[in-house]
């Protein structure tokens, strides 16, 4: 029963504090499942993020279901999934009137401008951690090759991230599979 509460708490807190959507919850969820509970290593977590990005749909719910399933089976998966959408559901129902009333407030706009860079820094820190984990696990040549290829296909060729992640998964299976 304690494990189910931990699954709920982990996903609920990550999603209630993850202002900005699914990608903003990733560093928060990483802190909970890697640092706090030790359910995953950084490498396992980065693989979960990669797989979550390769599949269609919101990443936060996919990751919550995966974390829940890995720690508590099917019931854990359902609890994790519910916990990931519960903050949005509760806030939407309770605060909709207040948000509509104050949406043009200068304070609300200022808060949004403050929060965006904070989320960008959190995502940057997580990216650096993923880079060093990748560098240690697969080596500098593969890491640099994947970074350059990812940049080229995303920024120069403007290929969908889905195909870039899928290509990286295939590359890993062919060249890095053990």
Image (cartoon, helix red, strand yellow):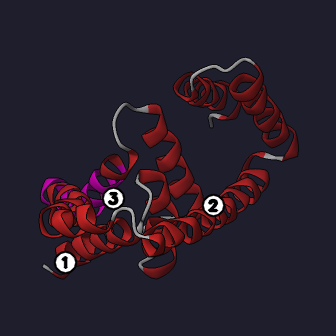
Give the image quarter of residue 72: bottom left
Query: In this view of the protein, which residue sits in the foreground, 31 or 19?
Result: 19
Q: Is residue 70 magenta?
A: yes
Crowd rating for badge 3 (residues with CA inside 10 Å; few <14, some 14–19, many 20+): many
Query: Which residue is pictured at 26% across the width and 60% down the height?
Result: 84
Instruction: State which tag comes first along the sequence, 1 or 3.
Output: 1
* Residue at the extreme right: 141
Q: Is residue 3 magenta?
A: no
Query: Which residue is pictured at 58% across the width and 71% down the height?
Result: 114
Disc number at residue 67? 3
Dot 2: element: helix
Disc 1 target residue: 5
Give the image quarter of residue 55: top left
Q: CA distance from mark 1 to mark 2?
A: 30 Å
Q: Is residue 158 above or below residue 140?
A: above
Instruction: State which tag comes first along the sequence, 1 or 2.
Output: 1
Q: Which x, y percent locates residue 39?
A: 41, 69
Task: Answer left or right for 126 relative to 13.
Answer: right
Query: Which residue is pictured at 63% across the width and 19% down the height?
Result: 159
Disc number at residue 68? none
Q: Which segment is the magenta one?
A: 63-77
Q: Is residue 47 above or below residue 18?
A: above
Query: Which residue is pictured at 57% across the width and 65% down the height?
Result: 113
Question: Which secondary structure is most common in the magenta stretch?
Answer: helix
Disc 2 target residue: 120
Query: In this view of the protein, which residue sits in the foreground, 134 or 95?
Result: 95
Q: Are marks 1 and 3 in contact (CB under 8 Å)?
A: no
Dot 1: element: helix
């Amino acid at each position: 029963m304690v494990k189910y509460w931990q699954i709920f708490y982990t996903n609920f807190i990550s999603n209630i504090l993850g202002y900005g959507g699914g990608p903003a919850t990733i560093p928060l969820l990483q802190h909970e499942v890697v640092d706090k509970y030790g359910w995953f290593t950084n490498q396992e977590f980065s693989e979960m993020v990669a797989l979550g990005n390769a599949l269609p749909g919101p990443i936060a719910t996919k990751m919550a279901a995966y974390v829940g399933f890995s720690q508590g089976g099917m019931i854990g998966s359902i609890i994790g999934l519910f916990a990931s959408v519960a903050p949005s559901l509760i806030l939407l129902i309770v605060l909709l009137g207040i948000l509509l009333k104050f949406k043009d407030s200068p304070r609300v706009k200022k808060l949004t401008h403050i929060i965006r860079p904070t989320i960008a820094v959190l995502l940057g820190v997580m990216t650096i951690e993923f880079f060093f984990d990748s560098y240690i696990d697969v080596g500098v040549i593969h890491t640099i090759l994947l970074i350059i290829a990812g940049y080229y296909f995303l920024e120069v060729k403007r290929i969908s991230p889905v195909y870039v992640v899928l290509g990286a998964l295939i590359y890993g299976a062919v060249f890095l599979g053990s």
